[in-house]
Structure formats: C-alpha cells, structure tokens
Amino acid sequence: MESPMTKHDPTKAPKMDWEAIKAQVHRQGMTFTELSKRTGVHEDACGQLKTRPNYHAQKAVAEFIGEKPEDLWPSRYPQKRPRILDTNKYTPVDSQKRARGADRIAAE
C-alpha cells in the first residue's frame, strides 16, 4: 500500500482507462448519474469525467471503486515540489524585517 506522502508522477499511465472505470462502476450496480446524485455533485459531472475534470466527481468515483483519484487521473494531479527559498538570495522584505524586530521586543 502506498504511503500518504507518496508523490504522484503526472507522466505515468492511469491505473485504469475510462472504459474500465465505467465498467467497474456498472459492475457494482451503479450509474454515473445516480452516483452524482448521491455524492452531491451535478448529475452530469461523473459521466463527463472523461473529458472534463471535476475534482469532487473524480473523488466520488474513485472512492466508489476503491481507488485514489491521483491513480486514475494522474495528469490532473501534478507532482508538487517543495519551495524552500534561500534567504541569502531572497532576503526578507521590509514588513518581514519590522515584524522580526517586534517579535524580539516582545520576547524580552
């Protein structure tokens, strides 16, 4: 099982193609329209996921078939990279400098 901190690669192939997702939903006795109604998204949202991203509908479908949305639609969930700025290159702005001084005064 993947850990929650696993990064998703947007270039990897989806775990299931659209036809397999649709077949899995139907195998479990559900339609996209009914799933949309039960999860509170627009009734057409789940059925249009092939061509229109909708994060709420993607989550609903993925949870229903026991998958993660990131695995079914990896290109819609880009890999995030941490942004740590070098304080020597990007110095604090004036407002941050003043706040630091106020913190020091309060700490004394």
Image (spheres, helix red, strand yellow):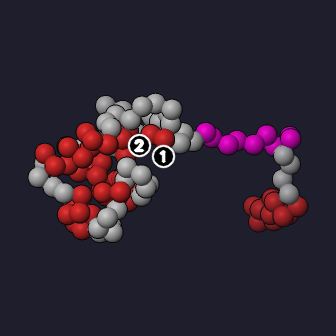
In front of the other: 22 or 103: 22
The relative height of residue 88 versus residue 95 in the rendered view (above or below) is above
Q: Secondary structure at mark 2?
A: loop
Residue on which the image places disc 2: 73
The circle drawn on residue 1 is none
Label 2 crowd (10 A; few <14 / some 14-19 / many >=20): many
The relative height of residue 11 versus residue 50 in the rendered view (above or below) is above
* Residue 11 location (% of width, % of height): 51, 32
Q: Residue at x 79, y 40 (%)?
A: 86
Work out how far the residue at label 2 is from the one at label 1, CA to CA, in angstroms: 6 Å
* Residue 18 location (% of width, % of height): 32, 43
Q: Residue type at mark 2: give it.
A: Trp
In front of the other: 57 or 44: 44
| Main SS, magenta residues | loop
Q: Residue at x 81, y 43 (%)?
A: 87
55 with respect to 108 (left or right): left
The relative height of residue 39 versus residue 69 in the rendered view (above or below) is below
The magenta region covers 81-89
Q: Quadrant of residue 72?
A: top left
25 with respect to 77 (left or right): left
Residue on which the image places disc 1: 76
Q: Residue at x 27, y 63 (%)?
A: 36
Q: Residue type at mark 1: give it.
A: Arg
* Residue 64 location (% of width, % of height): 23, 51
Quarter of the rendering occupied by the N terminus: top left
Q: Are marks 2 and 1 in contact (CB under 8 Å)?
A: yes
